[in-house]
Amino acid sequence: MKGTRHIRGAVKECPAAVPIFRIALATLAAVSTCTATALAQNTISVATTHSHAGEPPSQACKEQVAVLTDLLSIFPTPVQWKWVVICDDAAWRRFLWLRGVETDSAGVSASPDGASEEIYASTEIEAHVTCVRGTTLLHPDSKLAGADHVIAHELAHIVLHTRDEGRAERQALLWMREREQASPAVAAKQETGPNPGI
């Protein structure tokens, strides 16, 4: 997705990538998590810095999970996948830091060419895990960062089993266009802004 960098360990080029990803997830899990079964054999977990282990997730986390669950029912979805909604930006920045991505206080990272970019999701294809910045699901900071676009893009990586950003983006845009054509009301919602009740 233009303006978005997805962090994925290149297992073939860097065998340490998957363990680093798992360490990052394990560290976030220790902060506070809740897991629920989603569609098919998928699971959705939440990670947050705002509640203690064993406490129920916040209302915002529940709303973020609801948006993700709705989107997973709309787009093609893998049979077995683990989704982690990282509910607050402090936890998201910590996740990125554990992955070795340096960000400023707003969570913006510098790309190799020096341009700033926001990171909205991270998919590890071989580990069958996608982490999503939860605040993006409810309050996207641009049209390209809308919940449907971010999730469609990540699902394209998964379904196509590709790390190719251009290929995933083309597929995501195709699915979104098909969705808009099937329901003109969807297109109208996208024009007026985010709706957590998609």
Image (cartoon, grey):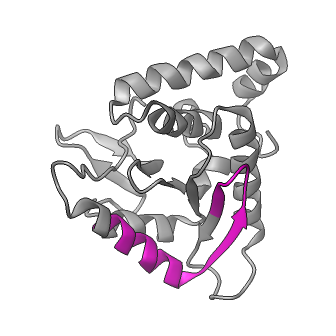
Mark count: 0
Judging depth in this view, the residue of 36 and 30 nearest the camera is 36
Which of the pair 109/77 is nearer the observer?
A: 77
Indicate the position of residue 183 as horizontal and vertical percent values. Answer: 81, 17
Residue at 78%, 68% in the rendered image: 59
- The region drawn magenta spans 20-44
Query: Where residue 30 appears, x then y in whole percent?
Result: 50, 84
- The N terminus, quarter of image: top left
Q: Is residue 132 left or right of residue 27?
A: right
Q: Residue 151: x percent and y percent?
A: 58, 40
Residue lying farthest to the top in this orientation? 181
In the image, taking residue 23 as reference, residue 86 lies left or right, namely: right
Query: In the drawing, does residue 134 fall left or right of residue 11?
Result: right
Q: Is residue 19 left or right of residue 190?
A: left
The answer to whether any part of residue 91 appears in the image is yes
Q: Residue at x 63, y 39 (%)?
A: 77
Dividing the picture into quarters, in which one does residue 104 lie? bottom left
In the displayed structure, would residue 39 be above or below residue 55? Answer: above
Q: Observer-nearest residue: 173 or 163?
A: 163
- Image quadrant in which you'd find residue 167: top left
In magenta stretch: residue 139: no
At a point 44% along the width and 77% down the height, the residue shown is 26
